[in-house]
Amino acid sequence: MSVMESLILELHEIEAVRFGSFKLKSNITSPVYIDLRLMVSFPRLLSRTASFLWDSLPPASSSSFDLVCGVPYTALPIATCISLSRSIPMVMRRKEVKGHGTSKSIEGAFSPGLSCLVVEDLVTSGSSVLETAAPLRSAGLRVSDAVVLIDRQQGGRENLAAAGIRLHSVLTLTTILDTLLRHGKVTNDIAASVRAFLEENRTVPVPARASLPVPPPAKARTPYGERAALAKNPMGKRLLELMEMKQTNLCLAADVPTAAGLLSLADKIGPEICLLKTLVDILSDFTPEFGLQLRAIVEKHNFLVFEDRKFADIGNTVTMQYDGGIYHILDWADIVNAHIVSGPGIVDGLKLKGLPRGKGLLLLAEMSSSGNLAKGDYTSSAVKISEEHQDFVMGFISVNPAAWKDRPLDPGQIYATPGVQMVSGGDDLGQRYNTPYSVTASI
């Protein structure tokens, strides 16, 4: 017996699948009724069902979702299981928006531009999915996919596709009926009546209140070559030209503990990247030859080096940290970054050493860790300081620059996004991760 047959038989056994005469939300009378609310009393079944839903997604798309949202109320425990098992943050749609408190229709922590997977237990016309997708999209989230346990095959898939939502289903009503008939759980007469019902009701219209506009087309992006012509810092110009030539905007965070491991990784991945981010002070086997060895690989594969030093001291001190010590960062790093907590003097100090050698600086305007203080006035100050040093400041470390109120995005600058990996989530030390798809959609 297959796992799907076992699932269907278990749903029938707990009476989540019943036959008779039932009025549905779509106002049609059906000879079969699916009541998946019963699963909350069967935790193992609920957990398995959540796994089946996730596994029904195409492998390429399952890694692109930043959030999940269950259609209230039956799908909420299913979405919770997915969130917990896959470490994907969850948001909740309020079915009734309260007139007090925050009066929000979507609860949870999220940023506009993130991708949200809608989770549903059962789809007939698709109206419930549309009613959930509408406030999600209004809140600035992207909704392009929904996953459901059972598709009743009555027009829901087509209705959702018309609104720009792909439906992924684990089971169909026909599959359930065939399985129950094969195992003697329903009679031929009942099966015939359900098939006749499906044939007569293949298209259930969506109620007007659940209508959902098709999302607008993606914004046109300025080509890297055109952006390079607008760059005021030589290294920023070179990076944009490199991105155009290699057709990649990928910066690899080589957070490895040894110089040998870093050099090996750089040689392997060099052809695919435009920028390599290093953390030199975590290398346990650092030697003075490291810089020359790294620059040889840079010349071989044509990429730039960004040392994630996060300078934060006064101007005089950072000049020595940049050019001296045991690391001599200035000799081998094309780009460095800095906090502005010590004021504009830190930029003056780094610029004194870096600008004559054609280097570039990224200011830490935002961070991706939970509870960080790089926001609001701090971000505004970073933007202001950059405007006074456009010849050296080539851009920012930023999470959501499209939302900055100080000024619009400058195509001549670099906006480097931290905390990006293939699967969204976080770690035990406060880091939050987004996916490449989510961070590029908002800019």
Image (tube, rainbow, N blue to C red):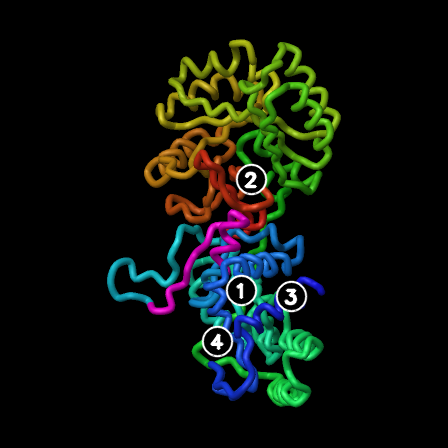
Instruction: Return the x and y of residue 408 as percentages of the image width and height.
Output: 44, 47
Identify residue for label 3: 6
**Mark 4, secondary structure of its residue:** loop
- Residue 175 in the magenta stretch? The answer is no
Three-letter amino acid code of the residue under disc 1: Pro
Mark toward the viewer: 2 or 4: 4
Position of residue 197 relative to residue 348, above or below, is below
Q: Quadrant of residue 183?
A: bottom right
Magenta span of residues: 78-96
Q: Earlier in the sequence, mark 2 or mark 4?
A: 4
Q: CA distance from mark 1 to mark 2?
A: 28 Å
Q: CA distance from mark 1 to mark 4?
A: 15 Å
Circles 3 and 1, Cβ within 8 Å, touching? The answer is no
Circles 3 and 4, Cβ within 8 Å, touching? The answer is no
Three-letter amino acid code of the residue under disc 4: Ser
Label 4, residues with CA under 10 Å away: few <14, some 14-19, many ≥20:
some
At horizontal 55% and vertical 53% (from top left) the residue drawn is 65
Three-letter amino acid code of the residue under disc 2: Leu
Q: CA distance from mark 2 to mark 4?
A: 43 Å
Instruction: Return the x and y of residue 379 as percentages of the image width and height.
Output: 38, 37
Mark toward the viewer: 3 or 4: 3
Label 2, residues with CA under 10 Å away: few <14, some 14-19, many ≥20:
some
Three-letter amino acid code of the residue under disc 3: Ser
Residue 216 bears which disc, if any? 1
Circles 3 and 2, Cβ within 8 Å, touching? The answer is no
Q: CA distance from mark 3 to mark 2?
A: 62 Å
Q: Quadrant of residue 377?
A: top left
Mark toward the viewer: 3 or 1: 3
Identify residue for label 4: 211
